């Protein structure tokens, strides 16, 4: 039996530039805590080997302190750690990966061609390559075949799984499985689909996803994969290690006509979500609403949600009342000025125009047209 802890895309040293300074500090601390949890998980899960498939850190922002933390974390792991540098932490001169003081249990691919590390105590060989720049047009594993040598063949690599064209080492799951590897630990895709298994579960190729979500476009529970190879069969399971999580939920407002109703619906949604202090929640307001329904998203976001942060995004659209078309007053002029865009084939343009009209109508009605 071989137990593999498969991680990727920690993106340590991320600047979280879009957040305010307090949130930024909290998210940086959460990411470091997630990495510490990963290092502990190797022992907790009795892993025989850790395969880290790239983007361990973001080279543009890595400080000496971050580098020390990464090396101390890896050296605390009681088994070998194999690293395949990715597009954010490429093996280039001056990078952490080319230093000559790496811990003894850390094995880093340094070449952009396929090579291997052998672990005789495990009967296993790990094949992989390094990204040596921000892009890699073809994947070195495409067409590679494992030798017939009786070893357990593993892959650790940063690659864009499932892509036919991509600047990040594109390769299909079929091509990965054709190499003959029993398990391919891949990195790069932050929100992956399920692992791809060959028939009878004798081979699998998987992206682990990112260690911790860093923005609403990386929603849900994040962490690592645990792959167990037993009697020639591969099984994987996810282990959640992200110490904070982005949650994105939708609140359809169809049928609601007043902002207090929206507040009530929001309160019910948040209560049902059972969020905790480690959740960063984004609520998307959707559906058709009357044009005079004003949504003060910042005020709505002050709702008590029990979460770390709450953000409200207004994605509603409005039916425009027919009578505006012939209204001789300013309201009608406004409508006619926006008419082309209100009926545009481009949904984004339509939505902006609807919102512009809604603000303008609200302003004319003497209301505060913020959103
Ligand atoms: Mn990447």
Image: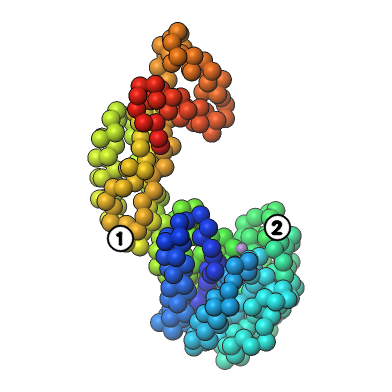
Which residue is tagged 2? 167
Between 154 and 353, the one lying in front of the other is 353
325 left or right, relative to 283:
right
Quadrant of res 26: bottom left
Percent of width and height locating residue 36: 45, 77
The Cα–Cα distance between marks 2 and 1, rounded to whole angstroms, is 38 Å
Question: Which residue corresponds to the image point at 72% horizontal and 73% vertical from the top-left?
Answer: 92
Contact? badges 2 and 1 (CB < 8 Å):
no
217 left or right, relative to 173:
left
**The C terminus: image quadrant:** top left
Density class for disc 1 (Cα within 10 Å; few <14, some 14-19, many ≥20) is some
Percent of width and height locating residue 337: 54, 18
Count of residue discs:
2
When the figure is inspected, residue 311 is found, relative to residue 327, above or below; the finding is: below
Which residue is tagged 1? 276
When the figure is inspected, residue 257 is found, relative to residue 78, above or below; the finding is: above
Percent of width and height locating residue 20: 45, 56
Return the disc, 2 or 1, that comes first in the chain's sequence. 2
Question: Which residue corresponds to the image point at 75% horizontal and 73% vertical from the top-left?
Answer: 113
Density class for disc 2 (Cα within 10 Å; few <14, some 14-19, many ≥20) is some
């Amino acid at each position: 039996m071989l137990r593999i802890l498969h991680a990727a895309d920690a993106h340590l040293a991320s600047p979280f530039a879009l957040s305010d300074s307090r949130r930024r500090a909290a998210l940086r601390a959460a990411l470091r805590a997630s990495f510490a949890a990963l290092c502990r998980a190797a022992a907790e899960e009795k892993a025989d080997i850790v395969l880290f498939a790239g983007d361990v850190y973001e080279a543009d922002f890595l400080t000496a302190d971050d580098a020390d933390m990464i090396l101390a974390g890896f050296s605390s792991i009681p088994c070998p750690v194999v690293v395949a540098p990715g597009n954010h932490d490429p093996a280039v001169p001056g990078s952490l990966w080319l230093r000559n003081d790496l811990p003894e249990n850390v094995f880093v691919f340094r070449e952009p061609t396929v090579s291997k590390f052998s672990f005789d105590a495990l009967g296993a060989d790990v094949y992989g390559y390094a990204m040596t720049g921000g892009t890699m047009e073809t994947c070195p594993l495409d067409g590679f075949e494992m030798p017939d040598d009786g070893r357990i063949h593993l892959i650790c690599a940063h690659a864009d799984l499932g892509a036919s064209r991509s600047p990040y080492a594109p390769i299909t799951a079929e091509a990965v499985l054709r190499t003959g590897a029993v398990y391919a630990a891949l990195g790069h895709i932050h929100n992956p689909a399920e692992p791809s298994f060959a028939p009878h579960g004798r081979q699998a190729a998987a992206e682990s996803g990112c260690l911790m979500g860093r923005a609403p476009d990386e929603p849900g529970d994040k962490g690592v994969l645990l792959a167990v190879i037993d009697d020639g069969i591969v099984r994987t399971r996810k282990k959640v290690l992200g110490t904070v999580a982005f949650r994105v939920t939708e609140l359809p407002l169809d049928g609601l006509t007043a902002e207090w109703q929206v507040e009530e619906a929001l309160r019910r949604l948040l209560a049902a979500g059972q969020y905790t202090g480690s959740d960063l929640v984004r609520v998307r307001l959707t559906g058709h609403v009357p044009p005079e329904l004003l949504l003060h998203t910042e005020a709505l976001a002050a709702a008590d949600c029990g979460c770390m942060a709450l953000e409200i995004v207004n994605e509603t659209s409005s039916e425009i009342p027919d009578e505006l078309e012939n209204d001789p007053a300013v309201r009608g002029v406004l409508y006619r000025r926006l008419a082309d865009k209100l009926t545009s084939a481009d949904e984004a343009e339509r939505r902006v125009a609807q919102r512009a009209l809604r603000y303008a109508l609200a302003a004319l009605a003497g209301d505060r047209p913020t959103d």
